Structure formats: C-alpha cells, structure tokens
Amino acid sequence: MKINDVSYRSVWVDPDDGWSVRIFDQTRLPWALDILRLTQCGQVAHAIRTMQVRGAPLIGAVAAYGLALALRVDASDTAMERDAAMLAATRPTAVNLGWAIGRMLTRLRLLAPADRVAAAYDEAGRICDEDVIQNEAIGRLGLELIEELHRARGNAAGPVNILTHCNAGWIATVDWGTALAPIYMAHDRGIDVHVWVDETRPRNQGASLTAWELGSHGVPHTVIADNAGGHLMQHGKVDLVIVGTDRVTRNGDVANKIGTYLKALAAADNGVPFWVALPSTTIDWSISDGVREIPIEERASAEVTHISGLTGAGQVETVQLTPQGSGAANPAFDVTPARLVTGLITERGRCSATADGLCDLFPEYV
Ligand SMILES: CSC[C@@H](O)[C@@H](O)C(=O)COP(=O)(O)O
C-alpha cells in the first residue's frame, strides 16, 4: 500500500544492508510513522510481544525473519530450536505464528548449519510474498460480495455500509489486509462504500490503525464506540460485517479480537451478513471446538485501566481511566461459534463456516 505516494509492505529486509529487518512501529500510529530496524531475534520477539507488530499474518512473517536473524548469530541445531520456540511463544492465539515458525523449521532442519541463514531469508521472503498473493485474492473474492450487495440495493440506495472490528488491514498482514482488502478494491473500483470502524478497546486498533489506513487510502469511514454496532444494525445502518481472524478451527469457529463475538450476535439478531476473511495460514486444522481449544491471550490489565492519546500540544500521553485499586481483566480475543458466521472468504474462494465448506476448498486437509 502507499503512504504519501511511496509503496510499502509492512515488513521488509533493509535494501542497504541486505539483512536487517524493517517494520513500522504500530504502537506509534496514527501519531507518528516510525520505521524500526530490527537486528536481533530478541528485538523481534519484543516487537511482537509489545505489539509494535501485530495482526496474525504479520506476526508470522516477522517471526520468520526473526529466526533468520537468530541464525546469523548461531545456526546450530540447539540454538535454532531454542530461538524458534521462543519466537513461537511470543503470542498464543494467532496460529499463523506457529505455522510460520513450523514452515521455517521444516526447511531448515534438512540443511547443514552453514546453509541455514540464506535459506531462512529465502523462506521468510516466500512467506511474505505468498501472504501478499493470498490477501490480494481474498480482496478480489470479497469484492464480489460487496458488488453483489451493491447491485441488490441499487445505486440510489447510498453507500454500502460495512462494519469492521479491530484492524485486519494491510499493516496486519504483509500487504492488502484480509477484511480490508475487499473494501480497498471496492473503493478503487468506484463502488460507494462507507466503513463503520469499531474503536476496539482496549488497545484501540480500530480507532488508531484501521481509521488511519482507511483515511490514508481515501475510504469514507466513521469511528464508533465498541458498543454502538448493535444499535446501528437495529436501524438498518449496517449492510455487512467483515472481520479478520487469528485462528479458525476446521469446523469454522473463529477467534478474533475481543468483542467480535458480540458483533456476531448482534448481526445474527438483525439479519446482517457476518463474513470472516482469512488466508489459509490462519486455519488450525488440528482442532474443531474453538471455545474450548483456542488459547486466548490474557494481556496486561494496564491496557484496560489506562489509555493513550495525543494532547493538544502534540505529545502522546497515557492517562489512567479507573480508580486506584480497581482490578481489570484483559482477555484479548474471543471465539465466535461457526453458527453465527455467514461465511468465510479465503484465497481459494468463499465457503460456509463448516468442515465441509473448508474441506471443499482445501481437499488436501480432509
Ligand atoms: C488480518 S489480521 C486478523 C486479526 O489478526 C485481527 O483482526 C486481530 O484481531 C489482531 O489482533 P492484535 O491483537 O492487534 O494482533
């Protein structure tokens, strides 16, 4: 995607030195566009844990480069296995992280230590390139959905109103995004779209990241408090919900940012289609029951008790919202049962959120 007419991916190898890894510091967006240079595996782990990089596909891609950085220091079997396990444990819910590390190890274990660094950069690059191709395909296939809705409503009916939660845009992936890819393509084709952006407490990925992305691309959008979606749906102001996901079970249960489940309930109650966009790297074929089997990340309570923003003087400031002594819990994801999901948009096509639907598209996993 472009920022100020310059094309970027959300992770890349520094072209000047050919080995260090560049990312945007997403904890500074939308207030500052800081590009970080990562030179050590430990820095990559820190970036993932502190959410300088976040979003399921992106943390997998960045962790892959983290392993390449680790191998530059020590490419022995013991060190490689240790560093891979450390990177894989940085965040528990998004399956893309374990998938990317597993794919790296599958290739690297076959090689002598001396051959591992070059192969690791090559494999991490492939993971990134494939992510871009998959997300572009999701964009095209999701665009058909928006076009169908647009045709059914007729041009005079005003914009197609789409609600999204958290940030499943290009900075949550290597490029394009998942939930936002169809929206970018619809907008680029001249379809009148408007996005309701859930603020997505506690870390506000909607208010800060999705709003920034959509604004930078010129897509009309409105930020809403997390609790507003149900009301808007009751009043016919949402035509479609599209969200991303961090892990989908083989029967179509969907883990995504905390609050997604409540949006799915409200959508079901109001007959609003609720679609989930994902690359196949987000499917966990080993589990079926999302509520029982998907590990849900519990993050620091300070993310709930405090909030950051820009002061009138242009400084980023963090302030406390809660009284001293009030405890806070911070489950970072929830699971939307498959029965509440209208369908899944993958790089191979759209399907129902069922084992049959997924297996028809991905027969190699039956
Ligand atoms: C294309 S990204 C899909 C999900 O990763 C996204 O919706 C999400 O929940 C991200 O959570 P985050 O905690 O910001 O990493």
Image: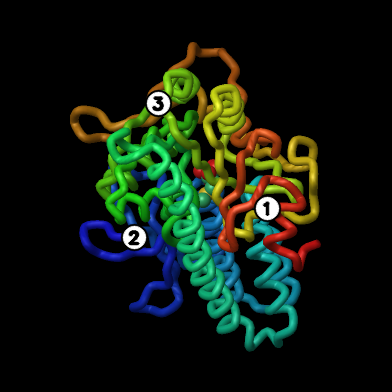
Q: Marks 3 and 2, how far apart in space? A: 29 Å
Q: Which residue is mark 2?
A: 1
Q: Tell me the residue at 60%/17% (across/down).
A: 327
Q: Nearer the viewer, mark 3 or mark 2?
A: 3
Pointer 3 or 2: first along the chain: 2
Q: Tell me the residue at 50%/57% (across/down).
A: 141
Q: Is residue 289 above or below residue 222?
A: below
Q: At which x and y percent is residue 44?
A: 52, 59
Q: Which quadrant would residue 309 be assigned to in this image?
A: top left
Badge 3 marks a residue whose secondary structure is: loop
Q: Which residue is mark 1?
A: 89
Q: At which x and y percent is residue 94?
A: 63, 49
Residue 101: give its label.
none
Residue 43 is at least partly visible in this image: no
Label 3 is placed on what type of residue? Answer: Lys
Q: Is residue 351 above or below residue 67?
A: above
Q: Nearer the viewer, residue 173 or 151?
A: 151
Q: At which x and y percent is residue 363?
A: 75, 65
